[in-house]
């Protein structure tokens, strides 16, 4: 497909401003956003409405929202090219979510594995928002007629629902929404926890040894990788089933170095696990140092960050209003006179 053609297509993705943005978010999502932003019209969201589905401290959440925006920029999202949006600045996300929730069955939401996982992790706060989270995510995507959604493998099920809802609305009323395609990277789609490689690395994990945060200092990164759980084998060979911890480290090395997995295996042939761990820690530090430098240089500049959000909201609201006026008309609402 030519660049010109792709420019007519939109990519969209977002991350909840909760916990610590981690290397899993980076290789599963952010790195691909950066690579794709010049090929497509791009919209990147800080999804604060999603974040309150688990309990947050308001003053912390406010800080996190700007911190995540600054980390997106530090990772390479270019505010002159991409539209960067704070989800709560565009009220149409919630409006479309309501309409789509009337097309979603309880059974579909009951099957969502993220809801099951999060209900276990937050058993004192299993709220309706946590249950309907995937509908709001579908609204985020469909509101902007996104064609491609770069996400990690954990979001595949939610993406399927967004596709189903787009098709359901289109066939019940008339063609209205683009049906989005997931963009899941070949390597790094599912970075696993460092201490428990059977579960995914999660940015809100209470045990910080399970994750590498994008803002972790070099000595912390080196220590966490050194202590990452592996097995008692000696050769560096990728096997997700019998050696999940080692496979996770090889896969991370592959994503960050750009080498495919067999090349990484050859590169470390005859070497010990400790060598892989040291080289991986160095590679992560090398990747994150420039990100951290940029982050620290912009995070205090609140005016700059707020102006990016102001511009992002203006662009986003224009697109969102266009979609919502179609949606409301099609479902049979009376459109206010001035919007006709
Ligand atoms: N381990 C991972 N490997 C690859 N991609 C991942 N993503 C998340 N974890 C991994 C991708 O990052 C984007 C943002 O996902 P999110 O906002 O749901 O964040 P999270 O890290 O998945 O957060 P948790 O663990 O659910 O904790 P909360 O949300 O409570 O902070 C997505 O594209 C995801 O695929």
Image (cartoon, rainbow, N blue to C red):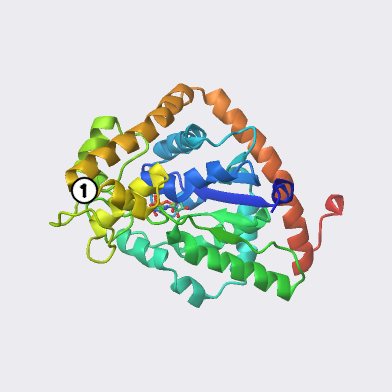
x 57%, y 72%: residue: 104
Residue 43 vertical placement versus 294 (above, below) = below
**Where the N terminus falls, by quadrant?**
bottom right
**With respect to residue 175, does 214 lie above or below?**
above
Q: Position of residue 29 (x, y in %)?
A: 48, 49
> Which residue is denoted by mark 1 in the rendering?
228
For residue 242, what is the image quadrant?
Answer: bottom left
Measuring 27% from the left and 39% from the top, which residue is drawn there?
279
Instruction: Indicate the quadrant where residue 122 lies.
Output: bottom left
Q: Residue at x 48, y 55 (%)?
A: 185
Q: Secondary structure at mark 1?
A: loop
Q: Is residue 99 above or below residue 288?
A: below
Q: Left of 281 or right of it: where is 87?
A: right
Is residue 152 in view from this perspective? yes
Among the 4 quarters of the image, the one containing residue 20: top left
Q: From the viewer's perspective, tell me whether residue 299 is left or right of residue 91.
A: left
Give x and y (percent) for residue 87: 57, 46
């Amino acid at each position: 497909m030519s660049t010109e053609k792709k420019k007519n297509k939109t990519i969209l993705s977002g991350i909840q401003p909760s916990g610590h943005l981690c290397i899993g978010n980076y290789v599963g999502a952010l790195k691909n956003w950066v690579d794709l932003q010049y090929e497509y019209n791009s919209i990147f969201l800080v999804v604060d409405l999603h974040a309150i589905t688990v309990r947050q401290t308001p003053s912390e959440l406010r800080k996190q929202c700007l911190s995540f925006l600054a980390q997106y920029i530090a990772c390479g999202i270019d505010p002159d090219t991409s539209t960067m949006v704070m989800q709560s600045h565009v009220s149409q996300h919630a409006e479309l979510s309501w309409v789509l929730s009337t097309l979603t069955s309880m059974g579909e939401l009951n099957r969502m594995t993220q809801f099951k996982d999060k209900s276990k992790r937050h058993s004192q706060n299993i709220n309706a928002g946590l249950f309907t989270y995937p509908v709001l995510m579908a609204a985020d995507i469909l509101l902007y007629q996104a064609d491609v959604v770069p996400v990690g493998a954990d979001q595949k099920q939610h993406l399927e629902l967004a596709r189903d809802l787009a098709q359901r609305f289109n066939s019940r009323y008339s063609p209205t929404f683009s049906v989005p395609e997931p963009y899941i990277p070949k390597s790094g789609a599912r970075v696993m926890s460092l201490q428990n490689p059977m579960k995914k690395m999660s940015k809100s994990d209470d045990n910080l040894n399970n994750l590498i945060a994008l803002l972790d200092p070099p000595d912390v990164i080196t220590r966490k990788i050194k202590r990452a759980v592996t097995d008692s084998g000696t050769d560096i060979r990728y096997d997700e089933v019998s050696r999940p911890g080692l496979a996770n480290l090889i896969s991370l090395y592959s994503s960050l170095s750009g080498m495919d997995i067999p090349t990484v295996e050859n590169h470390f042939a005859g070497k010990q696990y400790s060598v892989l761990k040291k080289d991986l820690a160095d590679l992560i530090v090398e990747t994150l140092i420039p990100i951290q430098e940029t982050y620290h240089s912009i995070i205090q500049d609140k005016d700059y960050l707020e102006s990016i959000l102001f511009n992002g909201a203006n662009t986003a609201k224009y697109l969102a209003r266009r979609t919502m006026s179609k949606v409301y008309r099609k479902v049979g609402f009376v459109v206010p006179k001035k919007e006709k």
